[in-house]
Amino acid sequence: MKKLLILFSICTLAVTAAFSQDDTYYTGDQSTVETQAPEAPPALPQYVQPPCPGDGYLWTPGYWAWGTGGYYWVPGVWVLPPSPGLLWTPGYWGFYGGYYGWHHGYWGATIGFYGGVNYGFGYYGHGFAGGRWEGGHFMYNSAVWHVGGGIHNVYVDRTVVHEGGGVRASFNGPHGVNARPAAGEERLMSHANHIEKTPAQVSHQQSMATERGQFAHTNNGRPAVHSMSTPGGQRFNAGGHAIGGGHAGGGHGGGRR
């Protein structure tokens, strides 16, 4: 009996320690969860960014979405913002005890909190390093983004580049990323004027939910289509090779992140 009590005490301490560790993860954003999933999303796949198709397009990184068939990959894609001066804050997954919750991305004048998830291509967990708006035109950092040859409003800042490599967690929580919003980011989460995804972005995600090759249970975390030139445009695999769709265009700079 004494041995059983000792064993029970050890197990209780272990469980208490586990919950105490989980309590160190940020859950203050639970009220903005849009979708719930019973399991963690797969790691983010490594892939090459296709060239920017034209002036004014901004890169929105790929992510795992949840549907009736489980997790499916929504390819990274170049899109036009709703209006000049807006930037894209990516969505992210967070863990909340019994489930994983998805916080959708949005457009705004500044970049908000996106779970500390390193999506690459200038979205390295906090802030944004892909470029900036100046006088109604977007200035592209070609050290970070794959800029098309016909785009001349570029600059080079290699100090902000975070190299890829290794497994990248796709969620904030135990066994993933442990990140909390800075004071300014937390204020933006509740008070900023967020602009929803464009119809093209909504259609882009919906179309991927119908493709078997995008689902994690089918592709083992290696989707058939990793990125696209525009919603409904040219498709690319992980290595940046065109695999069908519309016109891809050409360019220079950028790479795998």
Image (spheres, rainbow, N blue to C red):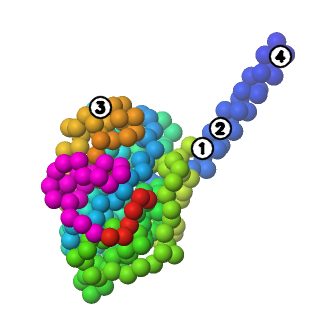
Q: Residue most toward the top?
A: 1
Q: Are marks 1 and 3 in contact (CB under 8 Å)?
A: no
Q: Quadrant of residue 133?
A: bottom left
Image disc number at residue 3: 4
Badge 3 is on which residue? 69
Q: Are marks 4 and 2 in contact (CB under 8 Å)?
A: no
Observer able to see residue 26: no
Q: Could you give the CA–CA distance between mark 4 and mark 3, rounded to whole angstroms?
A: 47 Å
Most common secondary structure along the magenta stretch: loop
Q: Could you give the CA–CA distance between mark 2 and mark 1, rounded to whole angstroms?
A: 6 Å
Q: Could you give the CA–CA distance between mark 4 and mark 2, rounded to whole angstroms?
A: 23 Å
Q: Could you give the CA–CA distance between mark 3 and mark 2, rounded to whole angstroms?
A: 31 Å
Q: Quadrant of residue 79?
A: bottom left
Crowding near the residue tagged with mark 4, few <14, some 14–19, many ≥20 C-alpha atoms within 10 Å: few
Residue, x 51% and y 39% (percent of image)? 97
Q: Are marks 2 and 1 in contact (CB under 8 Å)?
A: yes
Please give left or right for residue 15 compared with residue 7 in the image: left
Image disc number at residue 18: 2
